[in-house]
Amino acid sequence: MNSIREKILVPKYVQYILLPIALLLGLWFVSIIRTIIIMFLLATILAFVLDQPVSLLHDKVRIPRILAVLIVWVILLAILAGAIALIVPNVISELNYLIDQIPEYTTRTESIVRDLQRWFGELDLPYKPDITPGDIAGKLASGGEEVAMRALGFAQLLFNMGLNAFLIVVISIYMLIDASRLKKTAREAFPPQFQADAVRLFERVQTALGSYLRGQLLVSTIMGILGGMIAFYGGAGTYVFIIAVWVALTEVIPLIGPFLGAAPAVILAYFTVSPTRAMWVALLFLIVQQLEGHILVPRIMGKSVGVHPLWVMFAVLSGASIAGLPGGLLAVPMVAIIKVTIDFCREEMVLEKWDRPLLEKKPVEDGESA
C-alpha cells in the first residue's frame, strides 16, 4: 500500500521570481567558466569520434573497453609522433635558415622602400609617405626586445594550449571508458517513449562529427601539399615544410584560414625572387582555393555540415566573439550538430495544429476600442 506524504508546494509567483533569477545566475556562471565548457565540448566531440573504433574493438574483437581505448589512443599518438618526427626537424632547419637570411631580406626591404619613394615622388599626390629606408632598417634592428617579448608570450601561449590539449585528451579518455554509463544516463534523461529516438539522434550526431573531422583532416593535408608545391614554384623551396605545415594548420580556421595560409608564400616569393613571381604565387593560391571551395569541400565535407556559407560565417564570428579562436574553431562542429538535430526533428516531429490562432481579427464599431 502506497503511503501518502506531504510535499512542499512552490507557489506560481515564487516560480515567476526564482526561475528568471536562476536563469540569470546560470548565464553569469557559464560566462565565467566558458573556457572549461569549451574544453568539455571539445573532449565530447573527440570522444564521439573515437567511440566508433573503440566500440568496434570492444564489440567485435571482444577486447575489454579500457584496453580498446588504450589501443586506439596508442595508435593515434603513434601516428601523431611519426608526423611530428617527420615534419618538426625540417621546420626547425628551415626556421634557422630564415633567421640567417633576415639581414638580406632587410636590405631587400630598404631597396623596395626606395623604389616606392621614387614612385610616390613621381606622382602629384597631396600626401607622400614620410618614411625612409633608414627608418625601416632602424625599426627592424631595434625591434629585438619586442620580438623577444612576443616570443616569450608565444611560448606561454603554446604551453597553455599544450596543457589544455592534455586535459581535453584526459577528459575524452574518461568519457570513452565510461561511455556505456554516460549513454545510459543520457538516454534515461528522456521519457521512455522517446529514448529510441534519442539514441538515433546521438548516432547521427556521432556520424556527422566523425565525417566532419575526417574531412577536415583530409582537406588540410591536401591543401598543405598543394601549398608546399606552390611555395617551391615561387622560389621558396628552402621553406617548403614551413609553408606546407602553415597552410595545413590555417585550413582549420574557417573563412580567413586560406588567406592566412597563402600570405607567407607570397611574401617569401616577393623577397626571394621578384614581385612578378609573388603575383603568380598569389594567383595560384587563389586558383587552388577556388578548387577547394568548389570541389574538395563539397565532395569531402559537404555531407557533414551542409549549411549555407552565411550561416557558417555567422556561427564562426559569433563563436570567436564569445570565446576567441577556440570558439571560432568550435563553431563549425556545433553547426553540424545543430543541422543534424534540426533535420532529425523535421523527420520525426509533427507540430500539432492549433485549434485557434494566436492572433485574429475581430469586427469593432468606429470609436470602440479593441
Image (spheres, rainbow, N blue to C red):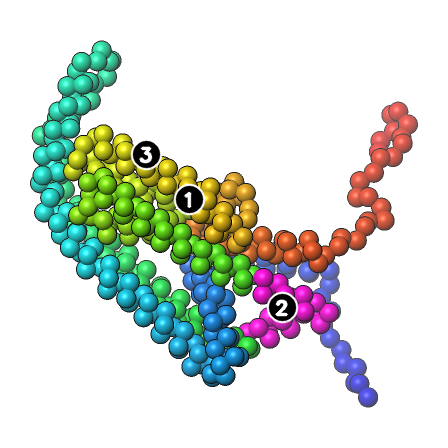
- Classify residue 278 by image quadrant: top left
Which amino acid type is shown beneath numbered disc 3? Answer: Leu
The residue beneath circle 2 is: 199
Question: Residue 64 at x, y = what percent?
Answer: 47, 84
User: Split into 4 quadrants, where in the image is the C terminus?
Assistant: top right
Q: Residue at x 54, y 52 (%)?
A: 303
User: Whole-Å distance between the Cαs marked 3 and 1?
Assistant: 14 Å
From what the image shows, is residue 69 above or below residue 329?
below
From what the image shows, is residue 277 above or below residue 215?
above
| Element type at mark 1 | helix
Marks 2 and 3: which is nearer the front?
A: 3
From what the image shows, is residue 310 above or below residue 7?
above
Q: Would you say the residues marked 2 and 1 are in contact, meaning their CB atoms lie under 8 Å apart?
A: no
Is residue 335 located in the magenta-colored stretch of the structure?
no
| Element type at mark 2 | helix
Is residue 183 located in the magenta-colored stretch of the structure?
yes
State which tag comes first along the sequence, 2 or 1.
2
Q: Would you say the residues marked 3 and 1 are in contact, meaning their CB atoms lie under 8 Å apart?
A: no
The residue beneath circle 3 is: 283
Q: Residue at x 45, y 55 (%)?
A: 215
Residue 212 vs residue 149, the one in the foreground: 212
- Classify residue 156 by image quadrant: bottom left
Q: With 205 as the anchor, is 42 left or right in this view? A: left
Q: Would you say the residues marked 2 and 3 are in contact, meaning their CB atoms lie under 8 Å apart?
A: no
User: Split into 4 quadrants, where in the image is the N terminus?
Assistant: bottom right
Which amino acid type is shown beneath numbered disc 1? Answer: Glu
Question: Residue 191 at x, y = what percent?
Answer: 70, 69
User: Whole-Å distance between the Cαs marked 2 and 1?
Assistant: 34 Å
Residue range in magenta is: 182-204
- Classify residue 235 by image quadrant: top left
